[in-house]
Amino acid sequence: MKPWAAAAGIVAAGMAALELVMQPSGGDRLEPLGLFAAMALLTLGANRALRSVGRRTTTLSGTITAVGLVAVGLVALAVAVGSWRMFLSVHDLHLLSVVLLVAASLGVLFALSAARPFKSDLLALRRTAERVTDDDLDVRTGITRSDELGATAAAFDTMIERLATAEHNRRLDDNARRSLLAAIGHDLRTPLSALQAAIEALQDGLAPDPERYLRSMSHDVDHLRGLVDDLFLLARIEAGDLTLEHEEVDLAELADETIEAMEPVARRRDITLCLDSPGGVLVQGGPAALGRVMRNLLDNAIRHAPATSSVVVCVHNGDGATVQVLDDGPGFDQPLLAVAFDTFTRADPSRNRRTGGAGLGLAIAKGVVEAHGGRIWAEPGPGGRVTFNLPQPS
């Protein structure tokens, strides 16, 4: 509501109260109406002046003191005029003046005292803002109030917490981006260097067995193609652009086919692949994508299982369809469990080609399983245990 409208409403309410209490005659109404109108005009003028002073003053104490003085002055004026109209004696008027002066002084004292906690909290808010400007996101206002200033401080603290979270996530993203670039560079450099060396040997006629060199080059090209395909698939997963087929898939049959396909890889390390399943574990999804998950998990288990050991794939019904891949390797230690399914995570930090690929297998498996509405997890060693669970049609 506009100040002038509020003032007019108060004057009208005062006149209505006067009519109700005193029932004055026509002439008696003019004097209080004039007094009320004069006080309203003084109030509006003081309000305008206070706004101008408030814009120029540099302290909250000065603004609140001015408010107190104006309020006490308006009350004192009303009391003085009313007393004068009651024809008080000069002695009584002097006494009233002293009383009003003391009241005005006490009002100023009260205004200054009331301004102190406001000033202290506003200074705390300003210092907090300055420290946030200097990138200190651990600071908080420390203000606990139930009024608007407290709500502002709470909102400011919430903003700082969100900024701190965003900064933490930004640093994690920066670290992940650096790790991504380093990992891609490492996993591309080795086959490319081998290809370059083989090509130069063939061009210079220094290859004693060209057929063997060509087979090695073909292997390196397959490795590069697999890495590019994995990166492309992972990019689609992270972009939410993975298109899945929706058909009935028997996970037990799919696991059996995967074991058959991975037998040559396992045989080179004298590892036995076993399937433990009652059969008929049905889900809705894409057979190619789910087969990729099983191949990735089996490949990871074969690489970390000791020679002459076994890798077991357990497929069964229960609370959904569950697939578990078990090996006798060292398994996942606690630090690795937290990042096992992150991109380019590998248990072997040396990243040599003999002990594994680019570190995308578990990340791709996680993305495909979650795209099917399931979840995947690893359990601590000894022994590698990776499990994923998929919902089944009702």
Image (tube, helix red, strand yellow):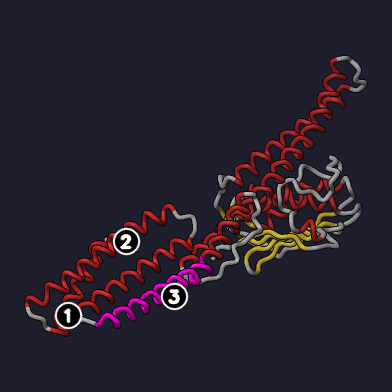
* Dot 3 or dot 1, earlier in sequence: 1
Label number found at residue 106 = 3
Q: What residue is shown with label 1?
A: 18
Which range is magenta?
89-118
Which amino acid type corresponds to the residue marked 3 in the rendered image?
Leu
The local secondary structure at tag 1 comes to: helix
How many neighbours does mark 2 have within 10 angstroms: few (below 14), some (14-19), or many (20 or more)?
Answer: some
Tell me the kind of residue under disc 2.
Ala
Pointer 2 and pointer 3: residues touching (CB < 8 Å)? Answer: no
59 within the magenta span: no
Query: Residue placed farthest to the top in the image?
Result: 204
Q: Is residue 191 above or below residue 244?
A: above
- Badge 1 crowding class, 10 Å Cα cut-off, few under 14, some 14 to 19, many 20 or more, is some
Outermost residue toward the bottom in this view: 21
The residue sitting at 56% across, 45% down in the picture is 241
| Residue at the limit of the structure toward the front, as seen here | 90
User: Which residue is at 71% across, 53% downward?
Assistant: 341
Q: Quadrant of residue 192?
A: top right
Identify the residue shown where x is 56% and y is 60%.
123
Q: What residue is disc 2 on?
A: 46
Q: Residue 172 at what x, y percent from top left?
A: 69, 49
Taking 169 as reference, is 258 left or right? right
Nearest the viewer among 41 and 370 is 41
C-alpha gap between disc 3 and disc 1 = 30 Å
